[in-house]
Amino acid sequence: MTITPAYENDLTHLDELDVHASAAEVVAWNGRRALRLTNGLVVMPGLEDADARIEVQIGAEDPAYPGIAFRIGDTLNYELAYAQPHTSGLWDTLQYDPVFHGSNTWQLYHGRAYQKRVVVPTGEWFGLRVDVKGDGAAFTIGDQPPLVVGRLAHRQKTGLVGIWTFQPAYFSDFRVSACQTLPDSGWDHPAAPTGVAGEWFLEGFGMIECEPSGILNLNRYLPLALGEVCLVRWFEVLSSEAVEFAFGFSDELSLQLDDQVIFTGRNRYASTRNRPDRGYVDSDMHATRLSLAPGIHRLTATLKVTEPFGWGLILSAREGRVRFLSANKGGPSSNA
C-alpha cells in the first residue's frame, strides 16, 4: 500500500533545520543536491512523532555511521538507528544505538536483537526507513529484511525526529508518514541470566535498576563526565560451598569482595573486525569461583568510563546458594 507522506523535506534549506553538528552544508552529490553533515544531529523543528514511518536517502564516500534519530527528548537523549556502509555484510551493518546523556550505548545493546547483517553500498544512495510504534521499532535498508527491536530503551513515547551521523555523510529526501504495523522479529529479546544482580546501590546516588537484559546501563543515570562510580551489592551465602560469579563490563572494572580485590580489568573498543575486541558487554566475559563462608558478604564494583560507547556492568551468581539482598540503602541493615 502506498502511503502519502505527511511531511517532506529535501534537506537543502539549512534555515529550516535545527543543526547540532561539526559541519553542515548543501552540496551536489551523486546526481542531486543534498545535505552533507559531519559529526552530529539535525532536528526537524516542531515535528514530533509518537508512532511514525521516517525515511531518508543516505550516501557515504568513506567510513561513516549515518542514520535516523527519533523520539528525541533533547540533543543528548534520543533513539537512534544507523547504517555502516564500510561494514557491509558484517554482523553490525545495521545498528540500534540509543543515546543517553550524549553517549552512544551500542556496547550495551548488541547481538541479533539490536544489530543486523545487511548489504549497504558505499558511494551510492540507499534508503533507510524507521517504523516506530508503541514500544518497538523496525529499521530497514532498501527492500532487505528489517531489524526489529521489540522493546526500545528510552521510556518516552514521543519526541522530535531528525538525522544523525558520525563522520561525513550525505542526506536527501527526508519524509515522515503514518506507521501502520511492525513485523515480528521472530525471537525474544535477551533475558537476564539466572541469578543476575538486577539492581545496585550507587554510592552518592541511591538504588538503580538494570535493563531487562540484566545489564546495568549507567549512561541512563549519569553523564560521562563523572568518570568513575562505586556500586555496592550485599548478598547472603546460604550454605558452605563454592560460589561462582560471572560478569561483563565496560570500560574498566575493579571488583572487590568484602576487603579483597578479586578482579581488575578493562574492556574497551578496538578498531578491528574481530567481534570480541569491540568492547561489548556480555554476561559471561569473565568468571571467578570462590569459597565463601555462610553469611552476609559485600560486593563492591568500581567502574570507570573512558569512551562514549556504553558504560555498564552485568553480574550473576551461577553457582552456589546465593541470595542477593535489597539494594535500596546499600547495606544489610536495610534488608528484611
Image (tube, rainbow, N blue to C red):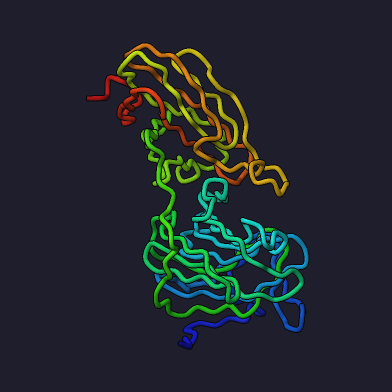
Q: In the picture, residue 49 is in which quadrant?
A: bottom left
Nearest the viewer among 336 and 191 is 191
Q: Residue at x 70, y 63 (%)?
A: 38
Q: Quadrant of the N terminus?
A: bottom left
Whether residue 204 appears in this view of the structure is: no
Nearest the viewer among 25 and 286 is 286
Q: In the picture, residue 242 is in which quadrant?
A: top left
Say left or right for 5 vs 86. left
Q: Residue at x 47, y 64 (%)?
A: 148
Q: Residue at x 51, y 74 (%)?
A: 54
Counting from the top left corner in percent of width and height, residue 121 is at: 71, 70
Nearest the viewer among 175 and 203 is 175
Counting from the top left corner in percent of width and height, residue 153 is at: 44, 54
Counting from the top left corner in percent of width and height, residue 210 is at: 41, 41
Counting from the top left corner in percent of width and height, residue 118 is at: 62, 65
Measured along the vertical axis of the image, is residue 238 above or below residue 5? Answer: above
Whether residue 130 appears in this view of the structure is: yes
Q: Residue at x 73, y 46 (%)?
A: 271
Say left or right for 178 vs 303. left
Measured along the vertical axis of the image, is residue 225 above or below residue 135? Answer: above
Nearest the viewer among 235 and 204 is 235
